[in-house]
Image: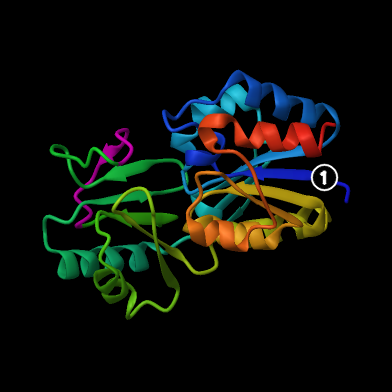
Amino acid sequence: MEIKIILVDLDLTLLRSDATISQRTINTLKKCQEKGILVGFNTSRGLTRIEEYKKLMNPDILILNAGASIYYKDQLIHTEEFSTEEAQALFNKTYEVCGRDAEITVDTLNDFYWNKKENKSSQYFPESKYDDLKNFGQPAMKFCVQTNDETKAQAIIKDFPNCSAVLFSDIPWYKFSPKTASKEHGVQFLSEYLNIPTANMISFGDDFSDIGMLQATGIGVAMGNAIPQVKAIATAQTLSCDEDGVADFLEKNILN
């Protein structure tokens, strides 16, 4: 099978557990690009939170906000979002379900907001703009809520048929996004846009939100540190993120 696109999740996949990328991994992916293979990030992070990795890697493709925004060669080619009205209604519902002290972050196309100035969760990304989300006034690509309570997550989306909820396995947060915005939807859109079959793509992931992506590509590789549910559906497995699992697999199977 000729691989034409490599898609990698970031956290605990391309990135080591300390959020760095090894020089070995950078070099390996650059060698793949030199062979004419397109390299892309497929991540739940938004644009503001991938800049340092973008500078290091110069990826051809960015599938961000778990499929809500897609870039090819630095050009925005697709977006999915909650309307301003939908977003505000969802924030209001979140406060109703989780209480006024609920911790919420929001990604728009170009910014990242947090509804807390102090006592922020140490288990989530620190960079943000402040907004109390009582009158947000913008469309939203996705938002995240500090809870691992499935009952609360389902209560938030109950009256919003266009909203899905996915738990992060490594932090006690839920991600809420449009149902048409997912990593696998990103793969399918990219396939149609570039006229490259998904069979000619390989993807790497570790968490719940990666399952659809791994199933959508010709080869779906689970990291050694992936959750059991990811390993169960993957077509292949590699070493952990701290052992340069992405680089190791590509060196042995694509660059050999």
Is 237 left, or right, of 4 in this rendering? left
Helix, strand or loop for disc 1:
loop
Please name whichever residue, 24 or 160, is drawn nearer the observer in this view of the structure.
24
Query: Horizontal and vertical percent for residue 158?
Result: 32, 79
Quarter assignment of residue 83: bottom left
Q: Please give the range of residues in magenta.
A: 124-134
- Where is the C terminus found, in terms of image quarters? top right
Residue 32 in percent (x, y) is at: 78, 31
Q: Is residue 137 visible?
A: no
Q: Quadrant of residue 249?
A: top right
Residue 59 falls within the magenta-colored stretch: no
Question: Along the horizontal axis of the image, is 45 left or right of 255?
Answer: left
In the rendered image, residue 90, in percent from the top left (x then y), is placed at 30, 67
Rendered residue at 43%/33% (across/down):
17
Q: Which color mode does the image show?
A: rainbow
Residue sitting at x 59%, y 30%: 244
The residue to which callout 1 is attached is 4
Determine the residue located farthest toward the right in the rendered image: 2
| Depicted 224 relative to depicted 211: above or below | above
111 lies above or below 32: below
Label 1 amino acid?
A: Lys
Q: Residue furthest top?
A: 23
Q: Nearer the viewer, residue 186 or 198?
A: 198
Is residue 128 shown left or right of residue 223? left
Toward the viewer: 176 or 74? 176
Does the rendering let one see residue 103?
A: yes
